[in-house]
Amino acid sequence: MSSSNSAASPPSYSFKAVSDDSAVELFLIDARMQLVARGRRELITEQPIGVYTLKLRAGPTSREEVILLDRNMTYPVEPLRFASAVPLNATSETHEYQQAAAKDLSRKVNVELGKGASIFVFARDWTPDNGKVRSGHHPAEGLTLCSEQGVKLVDFQTQSVTDMSGDPWAACRVSVNPGLYRLAVRVATGEYFEMTLTALPGYFLKVFLVQRDESASGRGRHPDLARASVLMSRHEEFDKDSEESRIAEMAKLALVDRRRVYGTEMNRFLTKKAENPMLGILGGHLLLLEKEVDTALLRTVVQNLRKILPTPHPDVEALALAAGMVTAHRFTMPPMLRASWQIVLNHSVHQPELVPIGSLAASLATLITQQDPWLIWCRPGAKRQIDQRQRGIANFIKEQLEPSLVQLMSKMILSKAPKRVPALDKLMGELNLPPSTVAHLVEKFLHHTKSAVPKTVSDEKAPVKRTVAGRAAVRKQTPPKRAK
């Protein structure tokens, strides 16, 4: 017999939220702050009558809207504008005149240095709500393109097409030979911040930069490499409505936030790689954020990227290492992404040849900043600053190891078939440096150690010293993390 006091179940209604933006995530939250449904681009659910919060998220940008669900409802979602260095439609920091300039000038070569590949750089300023324009500041001030060896090839401040009216912009397309290049920014303190650009035959590399104001730290106002957007496409013309470019920006932001993605979102990242291979690279790294990595899928991504790219790409080969695949690539130059570099470091402990001794990558390893997603290194204004930083790391090595192991370390690293000593491998991991860099520091600063190298060293009982001062020294020498 049913109780007359029992309450009837509240009515339920269907709810459908639809967005035209494939980059937007949708979350439906009930009055108890519990997540009851989620989706990307489209959310379909059935819920009891009540008041709900619909949360929209695209990268670091979010918006919340209150919904009274008292009938079957289809709810249209307005585009969510997020900040991007690329002047795309439906983003929060763009002007139509900058979009038009990027489209027009991406088709015209300004500087010819070679043939087979192209690098288009568009640096711009932006002020909110057409506020006070920063008159007189050149958006490409201090920005240069350098060869792999560091030779300056293009001065974007003097060689770009520039418009200083409104929010100023500077654009320059450079025809280059396929290969590795360095994009460098010289700040007011004399320091250089640099990152790798990989130019491939048959693809157009497009780099977009907004400004960073570090006047308080003495570095002034300059193009911001940390917020740079790098697109790779078979089409030379910039498209402000490109879905691939918008998805690439979402993938980049997800990697910066170390945000795991799921299902249809990941498929969109990976299926667009032919049009923009950076999507495949970024998608591969997002796969590695999963609690259980789908290694088979990662291998497929690497295989497909290797097929569509005409020459080896350092970041693709780093993903190959993460997938347990064989690579003949040697990282003489750092890859474009810091996540790629971390993979190389992890594998170089047991494969020292990945980062060759004397290579640019080995020499830059002590100068890398703690930023994402791009691998950015700081080249101090004076050589003595580099030596001081490297000496601090060398002293840390000396304080951690017995003198005999200091000498053994260099010899083992240089050996073509090094014997594995767990104590040394562990220290390599703590230093987060390639063995070739460690060997260089030992030879440069610690070669005066007189202790004889023992004929045999026990793998399990290798003496290691641990000091608080030593760890403090290496932390002090690590480049500080700059705010994104």
Image (tube, rainbow, N blue to C red):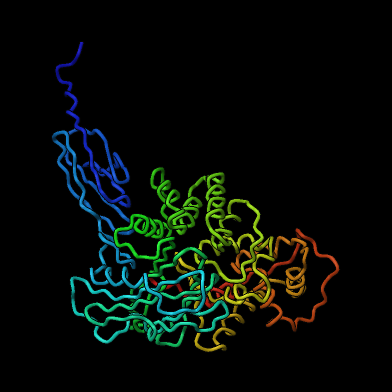
Residue at the spot 24% in from the left edge and 85% down from the top edge: 135
Report the side of 257 relative to 133 (left or right): right
In this view, 224 is above or below 24: below
Q: Residue furthest top?
A: 1
Question: Residue 102 sits in which quadrant?
Answer: bottom left
In this view, 103 is above or below 13: below
Report the side of 106 relative to 334 (left or right): left
Report the side of 426 relative to 23 (left or right): right
Q: Name the spot of residue 387 as percent of width and height, x first.
A: 59, 85
Q: Name the spot of residue 224 as percent of width and height, x first.
A: 38, 74
Q: Nearer the viewer, residue 42 or 413?
A: 42
Q: Where the C terminus falls, by quadrant? A: bottom left
Residue at the spot 67% in from the left edge and 69% down from the top edge: 435
Question: Residue 386 sits in which quadrant?
Answer: bottom right
Q: Name the spot of residue 74 as percent of width and height, x first.
A: 18, 39
Report the side of 470 relative to 10 (left or right): right
Question: Residue 422 sits in which quadrant?
Answer: bottom right
Residue at the spot 58% in from the left edge and 75% down from the top edge: 469
Q: Nearer the viewer, residue 121 or 46?
A: 121
